[in-house]
Image: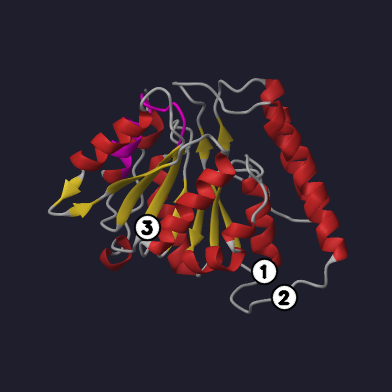
Amino acid sequence: MSLQHTSAVSTQLPAEWSRTALTVVMPTYNEAASLPPMAEALLALPLEGLRLLVVDDNSPDGTGQVAEQLAEKYEESGRHRVSVLHRTAKEGLGRAYAAGMTRAMAEGAAYVLQMDADGSHPVAKVPEMLGVALATGADVVVGSRYVPGGTLSASWGLHRRLLSRCANVYAGTILGTRLRDITGGFNLWSAAALRELDLDTVDSAGYSFQVETKYRALRAGCTVVEVPIHFEDRTVGESKMNLAVQLESIAVPLRLRARRLRAKPARTTGRGRR
């Protein structure tokens, strides 16, 4: 697996910031080949407080066992920098993220980063995203493909580019948000923002988890900041996108809008701004 895009120089944070308790939650299903280089790249970052939590949905290719081997490899003086949450069935990306985020907060994470295991999200951007959160007080930092400076893999064809753009425009229009990349999956959350969401009540099981959680964060008054990233195409494994996931992506924005119209005005927490 190539991680050429991770060779970029990462942001150097102040020593105190680099010790911030940050857990990267990485759902996996048949990612045995891609997981080791991703773990190596992440744990090489100048972030002393970073941990990796692998959430494996009983992968047939043995990803769970690979993750356990990584947990042993990266144990440092009794400190586990990699841990594994084994789930018994494949229940969807959203369910995996909710379980992982809940575990991360229970174990003391101040920030939680959603990240794919396939190499599509740039590892070198992680310190910058954490730095933006700490410097601005943002509740959510989105690694965005569609703000100025954001780019897509050259291997993405016109059809895929249009599909991705249209999905963002569709969700943003239905929900009335100004986020450029509401569908994106590279997101840094403060633990306070996640507690505000009440993850147990998030309905989306698949990729629409990304849309629903950002929308709910905005409705709760959280501050959301987007930073540009380069999104690379996966080089190992297969996409988990299927018809059921696509149909959910169409239905979820409509369901969230209908729920908003039926509900009372959202409560503002005072922690952030829309």
Query: Disc 2 and disc 3: Cα gap in Å?
Result: 28 Å
* Above or below: residue 136 compared with residue 89: below
- The amino acid pointed to by label 1 is Ala
Q: Nearer the viewer, residue 129 or 241?
A: 241
Label 3 element class? strand
Can you give x and y, in whole percent of width and height, for residue 190 in the image?
A: 49, 64
* Above or below: residue 82 compared with residue 70: below
Q: Residues within 10 Å of mark 1 (few under 14, many from 20)?
A: many
- The amino acid pointed to by label 2 is Arg
Label 2 element class? loop
Q: Which residue is mark 1?
A: 220
Can you give x and y, in whole percent of width and height, for residue 253 in the image?
A: 77, 48
Can you give x and y, in whole percent of width and height, for residue 173 in the image?
A: 81, 49
| Marked residue nearer the N-terminal end (1 or 2) | 1
| Residue 19: in magenta span | no
Q: Which residue is mark 2?
A: 267
Q: From the viewer's perspective, is 230 left or right of 206?
A: left
Q: Quadrant of residue 79?
A: bottom left
Q: Which residues are magenta?
A: 28-42
| Residue 36: in magenta span | yes
| Marked residue nearer the N-terminal end (1 or 3) | 3
- The amino acid pointed to by label 3 is Leu
Q: Residues within 10 Å of mark 3 (few under 14, many from 20)?
A: many
Query: Disc 1 and disc 3: Cα gap in Å?
Result: 23 Å
Residue at 50%, 35% in the rendered image? 89
Residue 65 appears in the rendering: yes
| Marked residue nearer the N-terminal end (2 or 3) | 3
Residue sitting at the far bottom: 270
The reply to whether discs 1 and 2 touch (Cβ–Cβ < 8 Å) is yes
Q: Return the mark for residue 22.
A: 3
